[in-house]
Amino acid sequence: MATPVYTKGVTTPELIRGLEYLTRPRFEGAVPSGSPLERTLDWLVNWSRAYSFWPLFFGLSCCFIEEITAWTPRFDISRFGAEVLRGSPRQADLLIVSGTVFKKIAPVVLRLYEQMPEPKWVISMGSCANCGGMYDCYSVVQGIDQILPVDLYIPGCPPRPEAVMQSIVLLQEKVRSERPTRKILHLAGGSQGTQTPILVDGLSKTRDSRGPGYYGTPPRGSEETPPMFWDARSDLMWTPPPHWIELSETDQSLAKILSEKFGGAVIQAAQTSDLLTFEVAPDRLKDVLRFLKTESEPKFLRLDDLTAVDESARREREKYPDYTLVYQLLSFDSASRVRLKVPLAGPEPVIPSITDLWPAADWYEREVYDMFGVLFAGHPRLWRLLMPHDWEGHPLRKSYPDRATDMPPYTHYDAQKHQPRDAGEYMTGRLAEDQYVLNIGPHHISTHGLIRFILALKGEEITALDTDIGYHHRAAEKIGERQSWHQYIPYTDRVDYLTGVANNLTYLLAVEQLAGIKVPDRAQFIRVLLTEFFRLSNHLVWFSTYTHDTGAMTPNFYCFAEREKIMDIVELITGGRLHPSWFRLGGVAMDLPPGWKELVDDFIKVFPGRIKEFEALITKNPIFEARTRDVGYLSKQDAMEWGVTGANLRASGLEWDLRKKMPYSGYEAFDFDIPYATAGDCYARYLVRVEEMRQSVRIIEQAANQMPPGRWLSDDYRYIIPPKEETLTDIETLIHHFINVTRGAKMPRGEAYMATEHPRGEQGVYAVSDGLHMAYRLRFRSPGFANVQTLPLMAVGHLISDLIAILGSIDFILPDIDR
Amino acid sequence: MSAWTLGIVLLLIKLLVVLVVLLLLAAYLIYVERRLLGFMQLRLGPNRAGPQGLLQPIADAVKLLTKEDFIPAGADRVIFLYAPALVAGTALLIFAVIPFARGWTFRGQEIPGVVSDLNVGLLFILALSSIGVYGVALGGWASNSKFALLGAIRGAAQMISYELALGLALVPVVMLARSFSLVDIVQAQARLPFIILQPLAFMIFFISAVAEMKRIPFDIPEAENELVAGYHTEYSGMRFGLYFLGEYVTMVTLGAMLAAFFLGGWRGPLLPPLLWFFIKVFIVVFALIWIRATLPRLRYDRLMEFGWKILIPVALLNIIITGGVMLALRR
C-alpha cells in the first residue's frame, strides 16, 4: 500500500487506511492469538496499562531535567495518564533511566528496578544511559542495558521533552503487542513487561565507537596497526610564553612580608598569569597557612580550593616534583587570592592535614587522597570521597586509565556486588541508645540528584549527619586531560547542567587568561546576556523545586512555563537548550541571529510581572514562612571560613558578589545591585535568590539595549577557531582553522585560575597547561562542594522536614559537586 | 409480595446503588482532581483514555488490579494484607448514616434518603474515623520499613490529635440540633444552615477534616518529599490502590458530612434534593483540590502545635459561647 498523502479532499476510508498504515504495529508478537475471551482480556489489560504508566520519580543526570519538562505546561505528559510520578518503586510501572549511569550508582539503580513489581518497563533516555555517550571514562557504565533489560532507547544528549512524549507513545505500542492474560492467571505462556535480555559486552553488544561490525579489528594508529604516533604532534609547534600579569601593591607587600618571615621556605613564583603564587616547603606549610589566616594583612579567611597535580607526565620531567599540592586562599578584605604550591616526592607522599586550621579542608583532603593517593596525617577520617569505597586505584594519577573502554566492562554481576558502604559505618560512635540511622538517598526525591545523607535520628530530630557524595562523578577533570582545549567546551556545559553556558564562561576565561586572548566587546556582552538568562533559568528551576520540597506543587508548572520562554530565546540564539556549548575561545560561536532583540524585549516586558505572581503565591504564605524562617541558620563567620558562596553567603550577611568585587567579562559596565540578607536562614536564602532574578532582568535589559556592534570573535587565530567564511578567502586562516579544528590549538605552558559568580556560587577553573593541545590538569572549584559540606552546621538539631527545606535552600546540583 | 420482603429488596437495591455510586464517585473524583489540577497548572490533564480521558479511572483500576501484589520480606503478612481494607472500608461505612435526599415512597413503602438513620449517627462517624487511623498506623508498621514506620507514627499522632478538634467542633451542632442523628441535624437546618450560626465550628471542622484526610497542607504522613510515600511506601498494586481509593472516598464523605452538619444537607430551593446534595459535596471537593494546588506542606511539630494549642482551645471556647447564648435565648 502506498503511503497516503494528506491533502484536502481525502475521503474517510483513505484517511483510515492511511492512519492504519502509520500506526501499524512495530513490535513483534502483535499477531492476535488464543481464545476470543483471552484476546478480549488481553486487549482490555493492555489498553489499561498503556494509559496508566506511572513512572518512578527517578533521574540520574541532565536528561532528567528534559524528562521532567515533559510534565510541565507546554508538553504535559499527563494526557497519557502518565503524570503520576511515584516516589516508591513499589507503585511504579515505568523506569525512565534518564542520564549517566555511574558505577557508584549502578547497584542502586538495579535495586530500584528489582523493587518494582511486575509488569515493568524500562526506557533508556539519552546517550549516556544508552551507551555511555560522551562519557567514556572510568566512572561511567557504558550503557544501562549492561545491568538492566531495556525496552526503548531515546537518543539525544539530552533528548528534548518531545522525545520523551514520543517514547511514551512507542511504549504504548509495545504494550499493545503483549499478551498478559496468561501471565496474570498464572498459566503457561503469555508475555508482559520487559522481555529483552540484559546485554553482555563483547557478546551481545559492542562498545566500539566505530559502530557494529568492527569487533576484533584494532583501530588505525594503534600498536597493532601502524603508524602509531607516540607523541602529540603539537609538541613540535612553538607558542609564545603565557600572558604575565603585574601584581598589585597589596600582593607585593604580602610577598615581602612572607619572605621576611619564612625565608627560604616560601619562594615567590617569578611570573604569574593570574594571582600571587608561592612555592612552600611541606614542613612549613601549616605555619604559613596559619599566618595567612590569622595574622597577615589582609587576612585570608577562606580556603578557596585545595587540589593536587600529578607531575609525572610532564614534558620537562626533571623540572617538577612527583606531586604538587595546590592550596588557594581568598581574602574578603582585599578581594584577592593567593596560591601556595607544595612539592611532594615519592609514590604515596604524606603531608600534615590542615583540618584543625580549616574544618572545610576535610572534603578537599579526602578528595585529593581519593584521586591522587596523597595521604594527610592527622585527618580525622581519610576515606574515599568520590569513588566507591571498594574502588581500586587513584583515577587522577597519570598512570590511571581514563576510558571505561580501556577497563573490563561493567556487568550485572558488578552491580550486584559493589554495594554502597553501610550507613551504620558512618555513624559508628555517634549513635546513642535510643537513636536510629536513616538513609536519605542516594536516590530520593528531595536530594535533587544522586547524593546520600546518613542521619542519626532521635524521633525525627537529627542528632548527627553525614554526607556521601561521588554518585555523580563524571570524571570531568580527567576528561579535560585528553580532550583538546576546544573539544572540552561541551563537557563544561554538563558540569552544571542547569546553567549551560555559564560554565563555558568560567572555563574559557581561565584559558583566555592563560594565553592572553582578548575578547571583543560584542562577544563580552553576548556572553553576559546568555549567562544571565541561564541564571534566570536556573533560579526558576530552583524556585520550582524548592517550593515543591516544601509541599507546594503548582509553582513548578508556572516556573517551567516561564523557563520554556527562556529556552526559546536560548534556542533561537544558540540552537541548543540545556547544553548549548556556544561560547568559544575568544568569543562566541556565531553572531546573534535576526529577531533576537524582539524576543528578549518581549521577555523583559512580561517576566517581572511573573516574579510578582510567584511571590504572591509563596513569599508571604504563612506555611512557607513557618517552614523556612529560623531553619538552617548559617553564621556569617562560618559561611566565610567554609568557602560558602553565592546566594548562601549573601543570605548570611556578606555583600560579596564576584561580578562586583572581582569583575570579569565586562560586568563592571553594568548597573545592578547585590541583594543580600542578614538572617542566614532558609527564608533569607529564598529572598536573596528571588531578588537576584530581578537584578538579572536588569542586566539582561542593559546588555540587550547597549549591545555593541563589531566582531563577535577575537582575531587571535593562533588559538581560536576562525569563522568558516574567512577560511574560504584566506590561506593563513584556512591553515589555522585546519590545525585548530583537527589537532587542537596549542596553549602556552603555564597555569591560570579564573572564577565567576555562577548562579550557584563561585565556580572556578584552574587550568594547567604543559604547552600542548589539551590541558595537563583541569580543576573545577565547584560552589556546591563547599556549600554542601556545611550541611551539618545547618541541619543538626532540626527535624527531617527541616533537612528537606535546608537542602533545597542551598541550591546544589550533583554534577557540580562531584564533577 | 409482602411489605416486609419488599422493604428488604428495596433496602438491598438502595445499598447497592449507594455503594456503586460512592465508588464511582471516588474513582471519578481522582479523574476530576487530575483534570482540575491540570487546568490550574496551565495543563490539560489526562484526556486520551476515552473521550476527554473519561475512561482514565478504569485504566488505572485495571492496571492496579493486574499488577504484582508484593509483600516485602520481614513484613507482618496478615496485618500488611488487611490494613488497606480498613482505610477504604471505614471510609465507605461512614456514608451509611449520611442523609443524601428527602426520601421517596414506592408502593406505599417509605424509602428514606439515608442508608441507616442511626440515632447516634454522629458518634458512629467519629468511631469509624478513629478506626481508620489503624489502617494507616498498622499498614506503616507492618511494612518493616523506616520510611513507612515514620509515616505511620506521624499519621497516628496527627489523626488522633485532630479527631479531638473534629469532635469538639461538632458539639455545638449537636447542641443546636438536640440530636446525634444526622437526619435530625439536617431537619434542624430547615430554616438556616448551621454554617451561618456556627462559622467558627465550620472552620474548625473543615481544617480538622482536611488533617484527618491527610491532604495538603496536612499530608505529612505521606509527604513524598520527605518520606518517599510515607506509610504506604511498601504497598503495590491494588492494595496501594485501596489506600488511594480510601482517600478519595473520604473526600466524598467529608463533603457529605460538611453538607449534613453545616450546609443544610440535601435542602435547597428549586433543584431536587439529591442534586443539591451533590452540588454541596462537589463544592467541598473543589475547595479541597484548590487548596492542594495552592498551599505548601506544614511541618509535623507545627501541625501538632496548631491542633492542640489553637484548634482545641478555640473549639472549647466555641462550645461555651454557644451554650451561653442558647441559655440566654431560652430565658
Image (cartoon, helix red, strand yellow):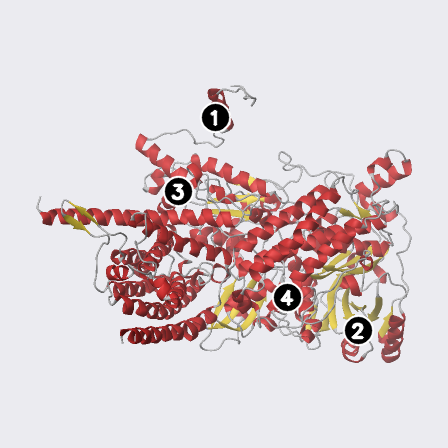
Circle 3 is placed at which residue position?
B59
Circle 1 is placed at which residue position?
A20
Q: In this view, does B88 lie to the left or right of A778?
A: left
As measured in the structure, the alpha-carbon distance from the residue carrying label 4 to the one carrying label 1 is 56 Å
Circle 2 is placed at which residue position?
A333
Q: Quadrant of the C terminus of chain A?
A: bottom right
Q: What residue type is labelled 3?
A: Ala
As measured in the structure, the alpha-carbon distance from the residue carrying label 1 to the one carrying label 3 is 24 Å
Q: Nearer the viewer, mark 4 or mark 1?
A: 4
As measured in the structure, the alpha-carbon distance from the residue carrying label 3 to the one carrying label 2 is 65 Å
- Circle 3 residues within 10 Å: few <14, some 14–19, many ≥20: many
Is disc 3 in contact with disc 4, using a CB cutoff of under 8 Å? no
Work out whether disc 1 and disc 3 sit on a shared chain.
no
From the top left corner, tell me how far across and down residue B176 is, in percent: 29, 68
Circle 4 is placed at which residue position?
A685
As measured in the structure, the alpha-carbon distance from the residue carrying label 3 to the one carrying label 4 is 44 Å
Q: Which chain carries label 1?
A: A
Helix or strand or loop: what does disc 1 sit on? helix
Is disc 3 in contact with disc 2, using a CB cutoff of under 8 Å? no
Q: What residue type is labelled 4?
A: Arg
